[in-house]
Image: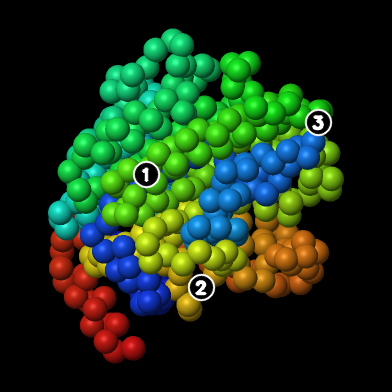
Amino acid sequence: DSNELVPVLNYLNEKETEPNSEMTGVAEGKNVILLSLESTQTFVVDNTLNGEELTPYFNDLKEEGAYFSNFYHQVKQGRTSDSEFLLDNSLYGLNRGAAFFTHSGNEYEATPEVLGEKGYTSSTMHANDETFWNRNVMYESLGYDEYYSKKDFDVTEEKSYGWGYLDEYFFSDALEKMEQMEQPFYNKMITLTNHHPFTLPEDKKFIKEGDTSSTTLNRYFQTIRYQDEALKQFVEKFKKSDLYEDTILVIYGDHFGISENHQQAMGEYLDKDINAYEQFQLQRVPLLMIGEGIEPKEHDTVGGQIDLRPTIMNLLGVEDENPIQFGQDLFSKDRREMMITRDGDFANEEYVGVKGSCFDRETGEKVEGEACASGFKEAEEELALSDSVVYGDLLRYLDQTELIEEKDSSEQQE
Ligand code: GP9
């Protein structure tokens, strides 16, 4: 019943940090374009293969916005759908299966719904079958007004390969659609080409493949390079469009592309041993936010996809009345640097805790003793509380205002 929300509210209350007030509302009333880059990991940024940059365009673009270099994906079996779940709810996905399938019937109070009350229209775009990851059902629950799937794009055989519609065409159709949209809008675009098994038509291979012991990784370099080229075409057109001045662009990686089965090859490429610490650090994905009022700067704060919603809401200056969110504003000056993975591992300012072991976050040196004990405990507690919300469908009790009032009055007492 609604009382089950009390421990969650108490925990979140204690953890609450003020968002960065200097960033509050810098993007008030603006459109939001979210660009989810398939399988894109941070290790490709500013990195090369045979002397050629893997992401030359992104490397320059990140100088134009707030770039987060210690930002992690937090997905599990639900992969891209988990990243969407984290983004729109600031709740953790589940440890097994995909909440998009198993809990699509829950009540949510997700970003599209909250922004809808502030006059935003919302949409999501992905050129795959509409039922993939149960998106057609789940997007309704999350409150999206429109879902543009494969059938809504100009998908032809010549413009497709592997998983489907090539990113460059997806981007160009998407921009046309956005130009017609009622503003302000919140629109999420999800790319597809850089997906396992990372294959491309010959004429889209802009660099040679790698020569590590993993053919998967070798091809990944090429699809990453292709995606960067598609991104370039998109952003350059977007900058010339009328949308540019009235929009913030949030680009992020959804999850890893290269699994731990390819550790040895990753080690060959990065020229180091991929131990538990390195494998953990490979779960960083790029995050870049661009728009007026967002100062170009590299941020090294530790954060994850759970933090996207509160960060975006603060930029928009939207008072988000849903108190059940586990993330924090990434720009907040007194944020608790902490990123928890679905496996109960974590990174904080000082340490990385992986599978019971503890490492110095910056040097990767093993730390003996109890340094990570409190981090593991916190991770466990936080995941359990988030799970209680999802498994118990607890957001349906949000309207029971006495709970929220209780929270407010306990806040005043502090
Ligand atoms: C499929 C796309 C990729 O529609 O979102 O899914 P993934 O396998 O990355 O979760």
The amino acid type found where label 3 is placed reads Thr
* Residue drawn 67% across the image and 53% down it: 281
- Left or right: 100 in relation to 31: right
- Left or right: 93 in relation to 118: right
Quadrant of res 346 = bottom right
Q: Quadrant of the C terminus?
A: bottom left
Residue 34 visible to an observer of this rendering: no
Tell me if residue 211 comes above or below residue 398 in the rendering.
Answer: above
Name the residue tied to disc 3.
212
Name the residue tied to disc 1.
240
* Residue drawn 19% across the image and 75% down it: 405
The amino acid type found where label 2 is placed reads Arg
Element class at badge 3: loop
Q: Nearer the viewer, mark 1 or mark 2?
A: 1
The residue closer to the viewer here, 299 or 324, is 299
Point out residue 46 in the picture as x, y percentages from the top left corner: 67, 49
Kindly check if marks 2 and 3 are in contact, taking CB atoms under 8 A apart as contact: no
- In 3D space, how far apart are the residues under numbered discs 1 and 2 (Cα atoms)? 38 Å
The amino acid type found where label 1 is placed reads Lys
Element class at badge 1: helix
Point out residue 314 in the picture as x, y percentages from the top left corner: 33, 66
Point out residue 44 in the picture as x, y percentages from the top left corner: 66, 44
- In 3D space, how far apart are the residues under numbered discs 2 and 3 (Cα atoms)? 39 Å
Some atom of ligand 1 lies within 8 Å of the CB belonging to the residue at label 2: no
Task: Identify the mark at residue 336; answer none if there is no mark.
Answer: 2
Quadrant of res 71 = bottom right
The residue closer to the viewer here, 414 or 8, is 414
Some atom of ligand 1 lies within 8 Å of the CB belonging to the residue at label 3: no
Element class at badge 2: loop
Residue positioned most to the bottom: 413
